[in-house]
Image: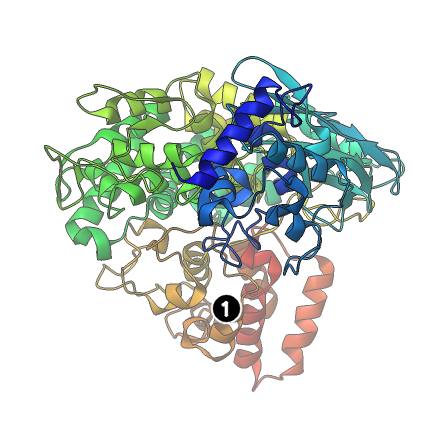
Amino acid sequence: MEPRRWRSSWIGLVAVLGFGNVAHAVSPPDFATRVIPVLTKAGCNAGSCHGAALGRGGFRLSLLGYDPDVDHESLVQEFEGRRVNTSRPERSLALRKATGNLDHEGGTRLARGGEGYRIVRDWIAGGALRGAGGSPRSLRVEPAATTLPATGQSVPLNVIASFEDGTTEDVTRWAVYTPADPTAVQCSPLGEVTVLRRGRAAIMVRFLGAVGCATVTVPLADAPARVVQRLRANFIDDHINRTLEELGLDQTPRADDASVLRRIRLDLTGQLPTPKEVDDFLADRSPGKLARLVDQLLANPEFVDHWAYKWGDLLRIESGRLGTAGATAFHTWIRDQIVRNTPLDRMVRELVLALGDGDQVGPANFSRVPGDARSQAEFVSQVFLGVRLQCANCHDHPLDRWTQDDYHGLAAIFARLDHGREVRLRPRGEVIHPGTGLAAAPRIPGDRFLKGEVDPREAFAQWLTASKNPYLARSVVNRIWRELMGRGLVEPVDDHRTTNPATHPALLNELARDFIASDFDTKHVIRTIMASEAYRRESGANPGRIPDDQFYSHALARPLPPHVLVDAVTRVTGVAEPLGNLPVGTTAGSLGDSRVPSTTLDLLGRCPRESGCATTPGASGSLALALHAINGTWLNGKIAAPDGRLHRLLREGRSDPEIVVEFYRIALGREPTDGERTHWKREIAAGGEAGRTDSLEDFVWALILSAEFTQND
């Protein structure tokens, strides 16, 4: 043993035994549970300081203290232990730098004589021992949710850590508090939260490797105006209405039947309703017609096309990686599952476990999308757990519970997979854990290590699809909610974590439980959401005109995705969109491969599926749409096409008012208002008889580019 290390260890032993002048009446502070929190609170191990990948100034700590062993070695043993002086603790380099006694790029981090200073000093005086302490298992933040009557008011948080040995401890003083939006609340070092503006704000709380979250709400209005009654159709409305009441928000009334029909038709099939469908739906006065409409559309082949397209975006089905045959097989399999309404848990299990020739076995292509075991782990966790596990690759996740063991353990589950065209299990395969330099042990994230399994994918698939596992159900219902309501209850939808709370946590949990109880029936989730009053609200501002983009006081206007917009323009103009070498009349919404050539879809921003799309792409309001519409041939060419709808109506001798009405009905699913009729009569007449055709083309162009047409609201 080197002399300096021997001396440090000997002094530590003397301190513990209570001998001599360095005797302590109590044990010195524990390194992991006392010293590291001080360093974390001071920002020493932040990513911008010594917690950076390469450290700072030749001194490196693990990010936010995730690895106490590495930190102890850096502080006590590196450079022959020159950073601590156990015989004269105050002269320790670590303390002199942190207190500003020596030049320090990071400035003063510990006040000399302060509580943090004393903890580090006493730890050094006690021998700078590693100790046996570890990270807590969980944090409890109290109060977890608070409502305050006005801005400027404060609430103190209390943080309790639970450790593996069953003990608990108040760690409020040493927890780190980070507001999700610093303009909404500010946090004192001791956990007092002061509200700066109205609304709901989340505060991330961290102590060592455990994280928690608290929310603070100030009503957006002093009192709701009670413009309309809070209607209820199912449990969804209970949760939404309760939050609106808490926030002092009124909601918009129900949308009219024509608007609801258009919304449902686009959401379920990606296609506009026909004028006949509108007439039939408006003429139907019988109760339950909305539920019957949903059931009819769920059985429509266009529903299969539309939702298979969504699955294709999520699962990244494209021929550049899978080849044409593989992409076709995968898309065909997805369509078949939708037609059969296969329970989602069975579908996921087959995707995770499928082997075989990807050109023949559709679900085997799920394992061909990622290129290796680590990519597979990230892909699976993002798609089915709604978790961004990649943040735990190089170090424990700074904002969540996931560790390097979780990341590399999940990758090890897929280590034997051959990701070529023939997806098979190789005799051997391993993933090296960067923290140990050894082969990572297969591990179900956050749960357990797997030992002795011939194929650990089986155990993982069983865990993933178990009814008691909350991750899959929460992830799926949140994605469906986003598709139908305009945003996820958790947003982004692939970032579920304690420190990114849902806008309505209890609603998300109840939706997940209901989904599981339905035997993982995705159509059941769709029916439930569409049956709610929240889904049927008018779009636009709520009655008080208070900004609200997450609490559903009104329907959120959603830009039509590129493929839906292309099909809608085709329907209105009556001119088919060319899609590669596919037959004329093929809809963009039926494509199973994002590599099918289409300049229009590319310019409008379709998801390329090479690395997935975090959000649903929308063309409405984009610069690409504006330029394409003004200068491109896509829209102008269709409107002016001799065989298009407009010029067919002109050849038939239809009057201007008749043409206006037909385009309104086919494009917007409604008749023009009196004001709109008057406006277009004046605009078209202004061009004179010689300019009639140009004026009508301008009318169609303006209608197609209107927000009402390019959005689903």
Question: Seen from this angle, which residue lies furthest front?
Answer: 20
Tell whether 357 sits left or right of 615. left
State how the image is colored. rainbow
Instruction: Look at the image and tell me whether residue 611 can be seen.
Output: yes
Q: Is mark 1 on a helix, strand or loop?
A: helix
Give the camera-side residue of 229 and 85.
Answer: 85
Residue 375: x, y in percent?
31, 45
What residue is shown at x 57% (from left), y 55% (from top)?
48
When asked about the image quadrant of residue 637, the answer is bottom left
Q: In which quarter of the image is residue 39?
A: top right
Percent position of residue 345, x then y:
35, 24
Location of the N terminus by quadrant is top left
Number of numbered discs on residues? 1
Front residue of 254/431: it is 431
Left or right of 577? Residue 658 is: right
Are there few (<14), some (14-19), or many (20+) residues within 10 Å of tag 1?
many
Query: Where residue 629 sits in the image (x, y, percent)?
Result: 50, 73
What residue lies at 10% left-to-right and 32% top-to-bottom?
Answer: 427
Left or right: 186 as drawn, with respect to 713: right
Compared to residue 180, the image places residue 627 above or below, namely: below
Residue 515 is situated, as x and y percent measured from the top left of the image, at 47, 22
Judge by depth and name the residue closer to the eye, 517 or 460: 460
Q: Residue at x 29, y 26 (%)?
A: 349
Left or right of 449? Residue 116 is: right
User: In this view of the protein, can residue 535 be seen by the observer?
Assistant: no
Circle 1 residue: 625
Q: In which quarter of the image is residue 462?
A: top left
Q: What residue type is labelled 1?
A: Leu
**Near-viewer residue (674 or 354):** 354
Above or below for 86 versus 610? above
